[in-house]
Image (spheres, rainbow, N blue to C red):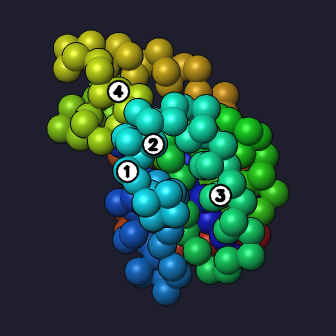
């Protein structure tokens, strides 16, 4: 079983991925952590030193390296499904779940965590929600290609067993 959680930054991919994987005896993989490990650099320095295009290439390669891993829940990065046909690859190689949240919910969470996220790092706090709303609009058509769409605010410890397990590939 391979589950890919997708959704905007701050949508709870890591939170729920960790919780559900420990409950169901699955391994949890955070794609950003794996990229940082493999590159020996933080996401922020990869963006700063090599640029976004390079990051997206590495991100896709690291994603593809999960092809033969079994019994995993993967928290993808917020941009992962939107580049290099990654959403198609994830759909072909596992079950995708979109954790959907509103710009207001996302902004509230991300305001404290902007510094490690280069995409929003330079947006001022008072413009954050508006920025998120715009980016979400661009990205939603990718997120919505997920097999299952979950309203993140309604997710619980039981959601995995009730909603995700029944559709797993
Ligand atoms: C990004 C989201 C981040 C990380 C990188 C780019 C994005 O992941 O991959 O900073 O483009 O939305 P999280 O969603 O885990 O913050």
- Looking at the image, can residue 87 be seen? no
Q: CA distance from mark 2 to mark 3?
A: 17 Å
Q: Which mark is residue 136?
A: none
Residue at the image point whose x is 58% and y is 74% from the top: 72
Q: Quadrant of residue 167?
A: bottom right
Q: Which mark is residue 120?
A: 4
Q: Earlier in the sequence, mark 4 or mark 2?
A: 2
Mark 4 and mark 3 in contact? Answer it, CB < 8 Å.
Answer: no
Is label 4 or label 2 in front?
2
In the rendered image, residue 62, in percent from the top left (x then y), is placed at 63, 58
- Could you tell me if residue 3 is visible in this image? yes
Residue that carries the numbered disc 3 in the rendered image: 63
Give SS at disc 4: loop
Image location of residue 42, percent across then percent down: 37, 50
Cα distance between the residues tagged 3 and 1: 17 Å
Of callouts 2 and 3, the N-terminal one? 2
- The residues tagged by marks 4 and 2 sit, at their Cα atoms, a distance apart of 15 Å
Look at the numbered disc 3 and give the secondary structure of its residue.
helix
Q: CA distance from mark 4 to mark 3?
A: 23 Å
């Amino acid at each position: 079983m391979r589950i890919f959680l997708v959704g905007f930054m701050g949508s709870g991919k890591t939170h729920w991925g960790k919780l559900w994987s420990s409950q169901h005896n699955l391994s949890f993989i955070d794609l950003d952590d794996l990229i940082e490990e493999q590159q020996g650099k933080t996401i922020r320095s990869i963006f700063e030193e090599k640029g976004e295009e390079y990051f997206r290439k590495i991100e896709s390669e690291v994603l593809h390296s999960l092809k033969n891993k079994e019994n995993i829940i993967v928290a993808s990065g917020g941009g992962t499904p939107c580049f290099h046909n990654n959403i198609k690859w994830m759909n072909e190689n596992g079950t995708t779940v979109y954790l959907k949240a509103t710009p207001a919910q996302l902004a509230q969470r991300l305001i404290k965590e902007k510094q490690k996220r280069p995409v929003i790092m330079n947006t001022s706090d008072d413009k954050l929600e508006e920025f998120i709303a715009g980016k979400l609009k661009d990205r939603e058509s990718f997120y919505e290609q997920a097999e299952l769409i979950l309203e993140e605010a309604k997710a619980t410890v039981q959601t995995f067993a009730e909603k995700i397990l029944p559709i797993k590939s």
